[in-house]
Amino acid sequence: MLAGGDDLQLAGHPLTVRDVLELEQVQLGRPEVLAGHDRLDLPVRWVHVAESRTAARFLEGGEVVLTTGAHWPEGSELAAHVAGVLQAGAVAVFLELGTRFHAVPDPAVRVCQELGVPLVALHEQVQFVAVTESAHRRLVASRIAELEARDRIQALFTDLNEVGAAPSRVVSEVARVLAGPVVLEDAAHRVVSCAPHGRSEPEVLEQWSRRSRVLVGRGRTRVVDVAARGRRWGRMIALDVETSVAPSLVDLTLTQASLTLALGVVESAADGRNAWDAARHQRLLRMLLDRDLTSTGHALAALEAAGLVAEGRPLVALAWTVPRDEVTGRWPRPDDVRETASRVAAQLRTGLLCTDEPSVGGGYLALVSLDPAGAGRPEDRVGSFAAQLQAHLPLTDLVVGGVSMPDHDVADLLLALARARSLVEQGRGGGGPLPRPGPTELDLLLGHIPSVVLQSFVERTIGPVLTYDARHGSDLLTVLERYLEHPGNKTVAAREAHLSRSVFYQRLELLTSQLGHDLDSGSTLAAH
């Protein structure tokens, strides 16, 4: 079992002003909060009894100050004294009434309100020594618990490193430790793994590609890059992080997880594999085959999050087999087959998810998303993909399991994939030989570029456009696509984009500002 076990919990919840306020000894003083009601969750580093007029000199920040006000100055100097204490870093002032004051002086209330620092009036006498003893006992216990939790977290990720845990396992562990949903995405904002932890996956992944582009680490959302050897592979996003978890432990967990993920992806890259890409493709197809996606909304959200455009598009389920190498007798590596299929799909403007099928030697399952603007039946149009695929791979069988039309019923999708797997298991590849067109010059070029490099290139060239569309719900990417299809004829491009020429020209100006390049330049057109 991994260090810490399934009951690993993050201790070290920092003591807060609210915790001090709720101490039994403080409650006996009938406390009344007069200022800073919305700052009671500020962390407390220490609790001091401070009666001296020079108390501010001895504060380092994060202290709750207990005082009777016995040596507070009078008149205009009182406000300056309280302000000095607060500016020195005090996170709250507890003033016991009865010794010097029978009511809290207005200048003290006013300064605390202006600076947003809690001011608590104690209407009965309180034993300050008992308060400090109780608070300090809590602080020490919290620190010890935090150190123990740090040891367990580090042991957990040491074990994950030693066993070479898959990305999905790492993400699941982080979600369990932080008690909130966690998503791992690649550099193109495509979901590699998701652990919803207490929330529904459709809710977590809804419009993920758009949302993730504007997500930043703020509040209960934490974001950490997964990077190694000068390359950023993607990000891990923790949502709804449990507020009771100490921030230092959240940071440690995310840092350790990002190092574990980086180590795994670098090792796979050294072997010529892309572990994240394999996980991204496999995750969704296995969820479909295992009936884990139980609703159409869930299926569409998961497919879109994984990078397969599904809404409004026909989805075709395919399966194929490739033979052993005649010389070595080995099957082709699944990563090589998937890379090849992905490149073919990209050249044909077709979406693809593809994974190996363990029940068939050399077998593969795929889900193809067809451009809705294409002519002909989906079954016929997927023939172009099959033909190009066989131009790069020696297919022995290829079958179409079925088509889920643009209105998508998840039952149709599940049935199509199951049928494709069943047909290829039976060796029932369709008909005669598939056409084998020769590769184009572009095919030869793209065939030597790793997919992670292509992802980075896409992000550098059109990332600003994708981010702008995500933030504003605009259609700049569609305008760019139509313009690139008809670079010499803006009238036709505007018509294909269903926009007037004037509006189309406005979009082009906005595109130019977002890309930082002149769209009339030949080099710019070639890059995009």
Image (tube, rainbow, N blue to C red):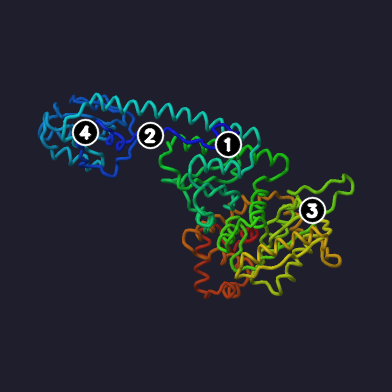
Residue type at numbered disc 3: Val
Q: Return the residue nearer the eye: 334 or 149.
A: 149
- Whether pointer 2 and pointer 4 mark residues with C-beta atoms closer than 8 Å, the reply is no
Q: Which residue is mark 3?
A: 360
Q: Local crowd at mark 3 within 10 Å, few (<14), some, or many (≥20)?
A: some
Element marked by disc 3: loop
Dot in front, 2 or 3: 3
Q: Local crowd at mark 1 within 10 Å, few (<14), some, or many (≥20)?
A: some
Dot in front, 2 or 4: 4
Q: Is residue 353 above or below residue 110?
A: below
Residue type at numbered disc 2: Pro
Image quarter where the C terminus lies is: bottom right
Residue 105, percent across and down? 13, 37
Q: Which residue is mark 4?
A: 28
Residue 116, percent across and down? 26, 42
Image check: 463 left or right of 14? right
